[in-house]
Image: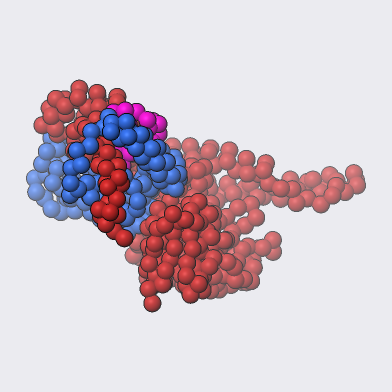
Chain colours: A blue, B red
Amino acid sequence: MSRNRLIDAALVRQAQDGDEVAFEAIVRQLDPMLRAWFVSRVGQRAEVDDLVQNTLLRLHRGLPDLHDPHRLEAFVMRAAVFETQDYYRGRYGPREHLAGPDALSRWSETAPDAGVRIDAERALGLLSEKVRTILEMREYGYRYAEIARSLDMTEAAVKMQVKRALRKLRKALGESAGGDA
Amino acid sequence: MELQDILASDPAAAVLLREWCTVRASLVREMGEASVDPEQFVLFVLHESGRADALTSSEQVCVEEIAPAFRQILANSPGLAAVATDIRRDMQDFEAHWAAWFEEASVGKAPASLRVSSSRSIQSYRSARRDRIRARPSRRAPAPAPSSRRRVLQAGVGVAVASVLAALVFFLLPVSPDTVTVRTAAAEVRTVELPDGSSVRLLGDSRLTYPSGAMEADDSRRAEFEGRAFFDIVPDAERFLLVTPDAQATVLGTSFGMRTGYDGTEIILVEGSLRMSARRIRDGAVILAPGQMSRMTSAGVPSQPVSVRVHERLAWTGLFVFHATSVRDILPMLSGRYGVGISADETLLDERVTGRFAQEESLEGTLDIVAMAIGAAVEAGSEGYRLTSLR
């Protein structure tokens, strides 16, 4: 995975030695490539500038750790994947103000402990694999749009699945609470 | 009423919420370390996918330590497995993108690789072209009497040969070694950044050739194109010349959709001004204004520009292209695309919006921008979304 065709190793070594002109030459070649890559991921959005910038920044910071200059492609790939993941996890976008399981957690941090004891595993067992996948991705930080893209669903369908799952859990938890009492 | 107020007045709801939070905590616990350290998780996936060379030595040591635990988590967590798939897909796509990008770039510099690359592309172009010719509707007149049929067939063959030759000449002419050629596969969409800052959203089965240099010299703002694309040409004192097999467009700074096909080139202008003419005949050129369309006619000259509903005519771009489009027209489009009900205050329906959005963007993102443009707020409700006037 070291198809470093155009950016030769000597140039990378110069950049590693602190030659800013060499690093700029590398950036000039990487910038349009990265721009096209991020547009292909996230569309023609204002955030693309930041994604490119931060990827290059990661590269700049990581360059001293690149022992083999022929591995530049792998290093750039890793930086781009990091930034893409950050984008999927909402670091670049406005916060989602939508009803969802995470919207409730802010309250839970300040809520008084009601002393509730429930069988969480049993409750989770009620969820289908699809819903569990969605909830876990959401916990990981993925935005609904990215969950939809990743699972090849529409965003509306993802939200609908979450809504139905919460309804199901509510019913099950209600029964459970009733049983305990 | 705020959520906290509701919960304060409804103890049952508060208990229910507490239960849900317990379930949620359990979910997070099962996701383990991966949920709290996404970067570590990315490194783990890269490592497991045979890309250890993307990690530093110390990262490799660290990942090897945590790998058994992460493998266990991954086996029990469908959500993290989906994220890992996503990471692997991005990783592989990036590697393919890198290879294609620098191969294309090296095509401009190394004539030897140009020959290899071009011959492969021409083969795929030829087969695609054959398919298109097969699928092409027949425009032939009813069959004439047998005596004249041979002449008509000969003429038809002659026209066909001329067309094929013209196409081949267009594609087989040696490309200047200082150019870059980008080709897209059948269902691929790729955005190409030109050296002058212009960008082109290339749709499937398209080809764009442009100078690899800075596009600063006289007449260097020039590109050859075939297929379907949306162009954003940045303003510059130097004109931009775009050439297709049968037409050419001259622009300064503008955006437009263009597609070429067996029935000629079609252009729909969104912003700026554009001059369209036949490729080799200067007579009969037309000037397009925003919102107008023209296409090459059988007479070999562009048709007189006509006003069209831009958002409908450019739906094939995969963009929502609005040119003074009313909110009344925009809402059903967004609603249909995302499958969610969207309404607006009556006073907002005749507000007009100009802009464009990739259809793959989230509905919330697009709605936020539309709302900002018309001075409205977006409210999410059980029935969908509503734009309410802020004025």
**Of the pair B286 and A163, the residue shown nearer to us:** A163
Residue B208 in picture, x, y percent from top left = 46, 52
Q: Is residue B117 left or right of residue B265?
A: left
Residue A48 drawn in magenta:
no
**Above or below, B31 relative to B300:** above
Residue B126 in picture, x, y percent from top left = 57, 40
- Residue shown at 63% from the left, 62% from the top: B296
Q: Quadrant of the C terminus of chain B?
A: bottom left
Q: Quadrant of residue A149?
A: top left
Residue A35 in picture, x, y percent from top left = 32, 52
- Residue shown at 81% from the left, 49% from the top: B152
**Above or below, B59 relative to B140:** above
**Above or below, B151 relative to A65:** below
Residue range (magenta): A120-140
Residue A122 drawn in magenta:
yes
- Magenta stretch: dominant secondary structure: helix
**Of the pair B213 and B196, the residue shown nearer to us:** B196
Q: Is residue A2 left or right of residue A128?
A: left
Residue extending farthest to the left is A17
Q: Quadrant of the N terminus of chain B?
A: bottom left
Count the marks: 0
Task: Say if residue B104 shows up in the picture.
Answer: no
Q: Quadrant of residue A175?
A: top left
**Of the pair A103 and B366, the residue shown nearer to us:** A103
